[in-house]
Amino acid sequence: MFDINFIRQQFPALNGEWIFLDNAGGSQILGSIVERISDYLIHTNVQLGASYGISQQSTQRVEEARQLMATFINAKSPDEVIFGSSTTQLLANLALAMAASFKPGDEVIVTNCDHESNIGPWTRLCALGVIVKTWKVHPDTLRLELDDLENLLTEKTRIVAFTAASNVLGTLNPIAAITQLAHRYGAQVCVDAVAYAPHRALNVQAWDVDYCVFSAYKVYGPHCSVLYGKREHLLNLTNLNHYFIANDDIPYKLQPGNSNFELSWGAAGILEYCETLAMRFFDEPAKTTYGQVTQAFEAIASHEEQLAHRLLTFLVSQPKVRVIGIESADQSQRVPTISFAVQNKHASEVVQAIDPFKIGIRSGDFYARKLIESLGLASHGGIIRVSMVHYNSLEEIDQLIKHLDSGLLG
Ligand SMILES: Cc1ncc(COP(=O)(O)O)c(C=O)c1O
């Protein structure tokens, strides 16, 4: 049912000779999204909110972008969607807008496997007397265990900040179960879905999360990001904008200055792409748009599972390779972001040997520095990461394997 040729035709950059396997760093962009951005800039690039016709159109487009994004993540209303330039910036702003509500002795829980963007802003609250606790992955399984979280939670916990999927391990975390547990203690959750959103449908209502964030440039779109917050929480946040912006003026209280209107309009084109995939790959496309989003990601997940299986089977067979994360490709356990280390080899050595073949992979800590340090891998240059998405083909993975299998991992 999955038509890889059709998929690849939707991404103009895939016509070239490069094999893109650093997608967790940033994916290639859909041609349809490029067209949307260009169309916005050519036809509706005026300031929002005036009474003349084009300004009304630009205002409508930006509002529609929020509606489309709300549908994409299954939010109750577009009033729960904030656009920003990056996840890092949105999370820093969120913590700033919550700061006034913290008192000394309040507690926050962060993990040691998140990207720093969902650790640092919460850790910095310690300047207000907030106590920061770290929920660590189990050293054997490299998973976040619910029992360990329960040992950290108290009635003083205000926020549990965790990742939906690790950008290094690829492991999927049980978002709804974590959220339910945090809520039992009266804490809110802030979920980083950046490494998750390219691979699975987000469902903020089913998860019941309080805040969730992802970046469009990893979901086949441009460099902008989306923050979801439950409306009742957003209303309680401090206004980060000018004094005359009303406290219930969402999104503007949390979008100081003009945001990237053309990129917001462009990014929202992901919804149309999901509809196209559902129509093309399913005999009975779902009746609702969100249903089609879930179908599109079902198709994406099963193709990605095959890619992950091909690479993991090879890596596991290599005596000097240690896969950092789950060794199974099972789509209920992981996304196809695959990290590994090679005994007695600096990670960059392997990557640089692959570079001349026009295959983009990468090494480092990927800003999940605490995880890499806790694994004792910092002095080896971190890990080697091969991050695949649904537009990658099995042939591309075979090309990479061929080059890795030429004595490089020995
Ligand atoms: C899991 C995860 N969270 C957050 C970020 C930061 O995203 P941004 O560049 O939009 O700030 C990244 C970027 O690589 C990431 O992989």
Image (spheres, grey):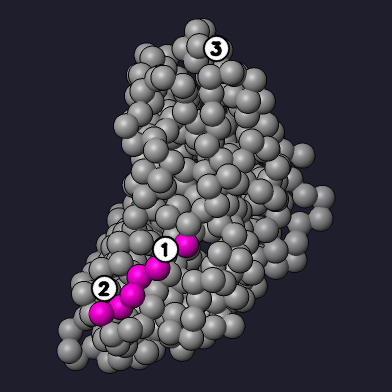
Local crowd at mark 2 within 10 Å, few (<14), some, or many (≥20)?
some
In 3D space, how far apart are the residues under numbered discs 2 and 1 (Cα atoms)? 13 Å
Cβ–Cβ below 8 Å for labels 3 and 2? Answer: no
Local crowd at mark 3 within 10 Å, few (<14), some, or many (≥20)?
some
Q: Position of residue 75 (x, y in %)?
A: 55, 74
In 3D space, how far apart are the residues under numbered discs 3 and 2 (Cα atoms)? 48 Å
What's the magenta region?
129-135
Q: Secondary structure at mark 1?
A: strand
Q: Position of residue 258 (x, y in %)?
A: 23, 69
Q: Secondary structure at mark 2?
A: helix
Q: Disc 2 beta carbon < 8 A from ligand 1?
A: no
Residue bearing mark 2: 126
Label number found at residue 134 = 1
Q: Nearer the viewer, residue 269 or 290?
A: 290
In 3D space, how far apart are the residues under numbered discs 1 and 3 (Cα atoms)? 39 Å
Res 228 seen here: no
